[in-house]
Amino acid sequence: KESLIITDIGRIFFVNFEEKTTLKILSSHINCKIPSLECDGNNEDVFSCGKDGSVRCWTVDSFDQKYQLLKLDQQPDSCVINQKENILLIHYESSYLRLYNLSTLKSLGVIRLPDADISHFALLFNNQAILLTTHQEKMFLIDVQNWEPLSLLHSELFPTPSSIPKNQYCKSLECKNITTEKAYAIATFSDGTVSTFLIEKINSKVEITTIDTFNMIEIHMSKTDDSNIKEMYSNLGKYRSDYMAGAKFSNHFDGVSLCYHECLQFLYVRNYSKNEMIKSIPLNYFPYSIGLSDDEKFIAVGSKEGIILFITRTEETFASGFNLDIFKGHYDSVDMVRFSNDMSKLFTTSYSELFVWDIAN
């Protein structure tokens, strides 16, 4: 019933959607964008990253500000909580990570990479390792021996896999932990490449193996004989780094991922364990964001045109059986789609707008 709305001018609205009332306005971030909100695992605190250089903590029960971490000249754009160690990891646009102990509010140190700028990061192996991608087409894994004081057992630069395209920006990174010594990672790139990696600890040594790679744009071009279309798509992603692309692991179906690129009007369902495409779902709009319900019966795709593509899986697998509904209302690209925990509502955001859809009815 209640949620947060973040705005470009540094204000956070705490609202009740059923009563259509604003319960509280949080405005300590002044005249700036708030690109990220992160809630802790106990659902007690919310952390906001502001373009004013500050990271602030709010209580969930009253939404009073508890504290502000050290305000810096650099701008934070995302944060992740290591719940096990009570550590907050903050990624700054200047391409480094800063770590804080949330019990003492003391900085544990800064993670920088030699001659490389961090673009994305994720926690692996029961939060005992950090996987990093960089703007320089490299992948690092930092094995953390002790979080406080921060002790890096080793920082390993993996040989650049051939599945990582040259001169392309990593657009998303997601990890799926299997055990404390085994995980999968999936990364997307602006030219349409999607690479899936197996990361394992074997005899205290970490090995990363590319188990699947494909290019969404190449798949699309292979289905047409029009030379003009082929030429147009062959240039996509080669000269622009701001194309949106993303991928999510399925948590209900082993070896399955869902991928999209903003220049292609399809959602690609991939079996990365068998290196084959399961299905290409036509959308008729350009995808910009994606969300999955907990049971993965529903898939919501936000588009550049402001349309919500609501996909219902009617069969037991992703191979067949889909219904597609269209929700209209946004006037700009849909940046985020999220399902409520009880899957009765869908939250979607675009520039200065937040919509709540009653999907139960």
Image (tube, rainbow, N blue to C red):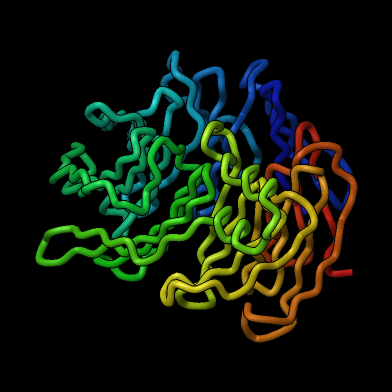
Image spot of residue 356 (x, y percent): 82, 51
Identify which residue is drawn at 29% across, 51% down. 161
Image spot of residue 4 (x, y percent): 70, 41
State whether residue 84 appears in this view.
yes
Nearer to us in this view, 248 or 339: 248
Q: Is residue 133 left or right of residue 49?
A: left
Nearer to us in this view, 197 or 30: 197
Identify which residue is drawn at 16% across, 48% down. 145
Image spot of residue 159 (x, y percent): 21, 48
Identify which residue is drawn at 61% across, 29% down. 34
Nearer to us in this view, 161 or 183: 161
State whether residue 67 appears in this view.
no
Residue at the left extreme? Answer: 203
Q: Quadrant of the C terminus?
A: bottom right
Nearer to us in this view, 352 or 150: 352
Image spot of residue 255 (x, y percent): 45, 74
* Tally of numbered discs: 0
As drawn, 353 above or below 356: above
